[in-house]
Image: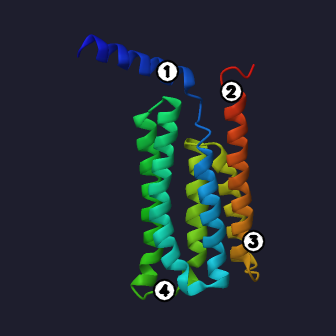
Amino acid sequence: MSPSDSIKQDLQYVANAVRRRDRSPGVPAIYFLWAFIVLVGFALPDLAPKVAGSFWLVAGFGGGLLSWYLGHRDALKNGVIDGELGRRHGFHWLVGGVAFLGVALPVVMGRADMAATANSFMLVAALLYTLAGVHLERPLLWSGLVMFAAYAVLVVYNPPHAWTFAGIATAISLVWAGVSTQRADRASAPGMD
């Protein structure tokens, strides 16, 4: 290893140690992206159920790729590229995507109808977001808890337009996470003392 590579590696280590928090607060743009996707996607089962699956297939993959891009761009902008944290995010959301496909599998195989399995999507999303809030980005915890509450309402009461209301509540919690992360970023920016 050349001396300049060694210095670069040492400086990267120090930068990561100084800037790293207990948990990353996240990237506001990603929270806003998913607030929009969730708002639209959760309303579709109530308003246009035939396109909900197609929407989530496209928005899930597309939103995941756009989230990766936004996260990488934010890391470059802040000068901290934490490959280990990026891999944890990637694996977390990849496992979540596999879980969603697992919930859809009985429907695709013709062994269950969508109405019988739709609530399971909310349960997987609630678990995925809550665990992300515990292990990756604290603001996601609240979105996950909102989804758990929505799951309970869907299963116990099954009121009309429950998915739409769950989408609105979850989108609000994601927007709140994005706004609070922006405020925290501004407050911790150099020169803000």
Between 152 and 11, the one nearer to me in the picture: 11
Task: Residue 24 in the image: state x and y as whole percent.
Answer: 58, 37
Residues at discs 3 and 2 in contact (Cβ within 8 Å): no
Residue located beneath label 4 in the image: 112
Q: CA distance from mark 2 to mark 1?
A: 15 Å
Residue located beneath label 1 in the image: 15
Q: Secondary structure at mark 4?
A: loop
Give the side of residue 7 with respect to residue 1, left or right.
Answer: right
Q: Give the mark nearer the N terminus: 1 vs 3.
A: 1
Residue located beneath label 3 in the image: 165
Q: Secondary structure at mark 2?
A: helix
Q: Quadrant of the N terminus?
A: top left
Instruction: Tell us which disc is closer to us: 3 or 2.
Output: 2
Residue located beneath label 2 in the image: 188
- Neighbor class of circle 3 (other Cα within 10 Å; few <14, some 14-19, many 20+) is some
Give the side of residue 154 with respect to residue 117, left or right.
Answer: right
Residue at point 65%, 59% (across, down): 35
- Residue type at tag 2: Ser
